[in-house]
Image (cartoon, helix red, strand yellow):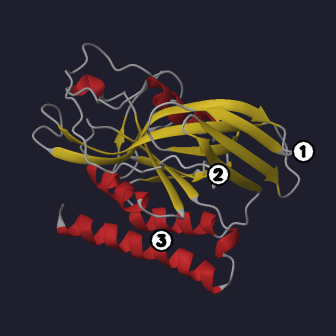
């Protein structure tokens, strides 16, 4: 990691840490919910590694839920991203359409489903995390791991809201390292954090009534629950699970570095390019779509 990038990562960590400290001093920290930061990134994008490092600096924080969604529209330039999904490309382009923009790019960070910023601009990221961290919650949420195969989700609106809202379950891999053999990042080994493996809608919820539901889960990947306006729009609540006191099953977070399998470049054009066309952003790679 370059000295410049180390300085940026440290600066972001200190600024975001200051957000939590300031709230605690005002006696409000106990009422705050974590801010969701989605990074749209690609192993084939030479502009993305600094943003991947910034996300890693946020991944260990309690006041931020940091999630990396790998897109597939750079696969055609020489390296197929081993974590990419067309579903994540569609989600990024849906944000663009919903917000009235005709552009997508990498690395892009979406903060709380509302504000986007170039992922290599740590001060802008910190400002948005601070803004949303200081916003009073709209929904109270509790996520409890009631067994190895189920979570209980409870939520209630804290003010009048329009619905329905989407109740979503997100699974992710905490960490992996990838040796990239071809493309713009050829010869590099890059570490990735909180790599989303699945983002699924559990149900729609009318916030006029309290929510109480149980969701079945499989596998050992960590999870978060995200409640969001349709669009996708604003994220109104997000929570990590806590273990039920009545259960004695182990709940662990696996941060052991893993080596992802390498993959061959895709033949032909990149998939998942329907929707908003792309435009360039500063310090970002842009992609054209239909």
Q: Which mark is residue 79?
A: none
- The image position of residue 3, as x and y in percent, is 18, 69
Q: Secondary structure at mark 2?
A: loop
Extreme residue toward the left, this view: 187
Q: Which residue is mark 1?
A: 208
Compared across the picture, whether 251 is left or right of 141 comes to left
Between the residue at mark 3 and the residue at mark 1, the CA separation in whole angstroms equals 33 Å
- Callout 1–callout 2 Cβ contact below 8 Å: no
Give the camera-side residue of 219 and 199. Answer: 219
- The image position of residue 234, as x and y in percent, is 67, 48
Extreme residue toward the top, this view: 268
Can residue 288 be spotted in the picture? yes
Depth check, mark 3 against mark 2: the one in front is: 2
Give the camera-side residue of 35 and 27. Answer: 27
Give the residue drawn at x 76%, y 32%.
Answer: 204
Mark closest to the chain's N terminus, 3 or 1: 3
Compared across the picture, whether 111 is left or right of 175 comes to right
Q: Secondary structure at mark 3?
A: helix
Mark closest to the chain's N terminus, 3 or 2: 3
Q: Which residue is mark 3?
A: 16
Give the residue drawn at x 90%, y 44%.
Answer: 208
Between the residue at mark 3 and the residue at mark 2, the CA separation in whole angstroms equals 35 Å
Between the residue at mark 1 and the residue at mark 2, the CA separation in whole angstroms equals 30 Å
Depth check, mark 3 against mark 1: the one in front is: 1
Above or below, 46 relative to 13:
above
Can residue 230 be spotted in the picture? no
Q: Which quadrant of the structure image shows residue 135?
A: bottom right
Report crowding for label 3: few under 14, some 14 to 19, many 20 or more residues within 10 A (C-alpha): many
Q: Which quadrant of the structure image shows residue 27?
A: bottom right
Q: Which mark is residue 246?
A: 2
Compared across the picture, whether 208 is left or right of 98 comes to right
- The image position of residue 75, as x and y in percent, is 29, 26
């Amino acid at each position: 990691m370059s000295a410049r990038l180390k300085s940026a990562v440290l600066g972001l960590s200190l600024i975001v840490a200051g957000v939590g400290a300031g709230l605690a001093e005002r006696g409000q920290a106990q009422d705050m919910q974590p801010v969701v930061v989605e990074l749209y990134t690609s192993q084939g994008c030479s502009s993305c590694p600094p943003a991947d490092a910034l996300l890693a600096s946020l991944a260990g924080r309690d006041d931020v839920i940091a999630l990396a969604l790998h897109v597939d529209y750079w696969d055609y330039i020489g390296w197929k991203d081993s974590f990419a999904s067309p579903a994540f490309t569609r989600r990024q382009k849906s944000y663009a359409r919903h917000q009235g923009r005709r552009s997508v790019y990498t690395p892009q960070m979406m903060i709380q489903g509302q504000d986007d910023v170039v992922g290599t601009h740590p001060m802008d990221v910190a400002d948005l995390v601070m803004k949303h961290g200081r916003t009073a919650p709209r929904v109270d949420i509790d996520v409890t791991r009631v067994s190895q195969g189920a979570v209980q989700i409870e939520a209630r609106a804290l003010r009048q809201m329009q619905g329905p809202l989407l109740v979503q379950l997100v699974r992710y891999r905490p960490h992996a390292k990838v040796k990239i053999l071809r493309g713009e990042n050829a010869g590099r080994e890059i570490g990735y954090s909180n790599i989303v493996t699945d983002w699924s809608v559990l149900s729609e919820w009318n916030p006029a009534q309290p929510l109480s539901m149980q969701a079945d889960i499989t596998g050992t990947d960590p999870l978060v629950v995200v409640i969001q306006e349709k669009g996708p729009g604003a994220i109104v609540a997000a929570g990590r699970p806590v273990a039920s006191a009545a259960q004695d099953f182990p709940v662990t977070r696996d941060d052991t570095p893993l080596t992802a399998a390498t993959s061959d470049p895709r033949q032909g054009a990149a998939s998942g390019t329907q929707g908003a066309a792309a435009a360039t952003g500063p310090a970002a790679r842009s992609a054209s779509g239909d």
